[in-house]
Image (tube, rainbow, N blue to C red):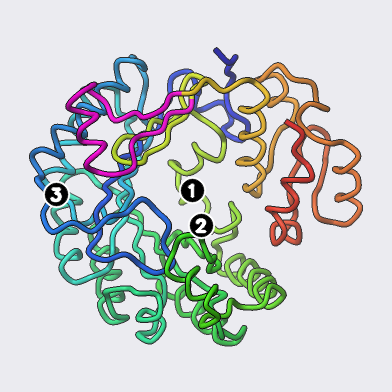
Amino acid sequence: MLRMVPLPGTGGKRNVMTSLALYIHWPFCLAKCPYCDFNSHVRDRVEHDRWQAALIADMAHEAARLPGRTVTSIFFGGGTPSLMPPALVAALIEAAAGFWTLAPDVEITLEANPSSVEAARFAALAGAGVNRVSLGVQALDDQTLRFLGRLHDAGEALAALDIAQRHFGRVSFDLIYARPGQTAPQWQAELARALAFGTGHLSLYQLTIEPGTRFATLVREGSLVPLDEDAAADMYAMTRVMTAAAGLPAYEISNHARPGEQSRHNLTYWRYGDYVGIGPGAHGRRLGDATQRHRKPENWLNAIAVQGHGIVETRALDRAEAAGEALMMGLRLDEGIDLAALSARFGLPLDRLIHPAKVRFYADLGLVRHDGDRLTVTPAGMALLDGLLGELVAA
């Protein structure tokens, strides 16, 4: 088992030996978006009672291995969790409270599509215990929403945002930029409009062409041309300047928040704390093991019936692999990584974690900063993060 210490950046307030994040995956959508490579499925009918029992069984399997933990966050992801009946959401929160202790300030997030049908459930979802919602707005004009395959229009999105802000203490929404043909002035205007809505958190993602998606097929056929990388990098730089000026600075490569409004659940991932993932396709990291659930909903349900849980693979991570994952996750954050704490946590010397000569090289280029024990990626480096990680991380 890996030696664990309080995570860097937490101030010692959340001890990884006791705190835990819980992810619940709801795999169903009304339609598959052409850019999406998440584990989402379209089904004509869903037996909610069967799914409630199965998800609770999957949760019970994790609880038996992690007794006495305090859950600091619950995240309903998907798929489209806002399609879940609020009574099912309430039952899963209640089950989690029975298996573990919920922190007094537990963050309970649900991803939602901003359609009028789903927005009508917001009051009931808040009553079920959800206190933070993340809306998949994605764009603020109808033409782009159609291009992205979204089922809502801009009017529905804005109405849903208004309803969400009335019912939930914390609201975030997503936008996708660096789209084919998009110009910097167009994104500047759209982002300025988004910032004016006053939410405490924004997730702003550059459009990525993921393998196996409809967009990937269109690119291969030549009917879709991704935006030039230099133009996308310029939009990224502009995004950081505008969000910082509005009081929502970047705290992770694609996430921006007012102080205190950061996603605590996602910070657990990025700070490499323990988290369990239940439901089809969910990943987990706990007690030095990596877990993976069956992806296909029917296969996951069959596994629950046969073995009492949905896990298809549990794999023990060696120290070097776990340290490498912790580095790659932590360097996504503007706070960076405390290398001394990481070295102590995994029992590895510094040169087993990073390539010191490459750190010096990229520091001279202004892409990283190495101050004492702390290594951070600069805003200029964040635009090149994938390539930098491959250069810097030795573990």
> Toward the viewer: 29 or 174?
29
Per the image, the residue denoted by label 2 is 257
Between disc 3 and disc 1, whose residue precedes?
3
Between disc 3 and disc 2, whose residue precedes?
3
Q: Is residue 58 above or below residue 17?
A: below
- Per the rendering, the mark at residue 86 is 3
Q: Is residue 43 above or below residue 391?
A: below
292 drawn magenta: yes
- Helix, strand or loop under label 2: strand
Label 2: how many residues lie within 10 Å, few (<14), some (14-19) or many (20+)?
A: many
Q: Nearer the viewer, mark 1 or mark 2?
A: 2
View extreme (front): residue: 221
Per the image, the residue denoted by label 1 is 260
The residue shown at (49%, 36%) is 268
> Toward the viewer: 12 or 238?
238
Q: CA distance from mark 1 to mark 2?
A: 8 Å
Quarter that holds the C terminus: top right
**Span shown in magenta:** 290-314
Residue 138 position within the rendered picture, expressed as x and y whole percent measured from the top left: 41, 71
Q: Is residue 271 left or right of residue 166?
A: right
The residue shown at (24%, 54%) is 28
Residue 87 position within the rendered picture, expressed as x and y whole percent measured from the top left: 10, 45
Q: CA distance from mark 3 to mark 1?
A: 27 Å
Residue 16 position within the rendered picture, expressed as x and y whole percent measured from the top left: 50, 23
In the rendered structure, which amino acid carries the disc numbered 3? Pro
In the rendered structure, which amino acid carries the disc numbered 2? Ala
Say whether marks 1 and 2 touch (CB < 8 Å): yes
In the rendered structure, which amino acid carries the disc numbered 1? Gly
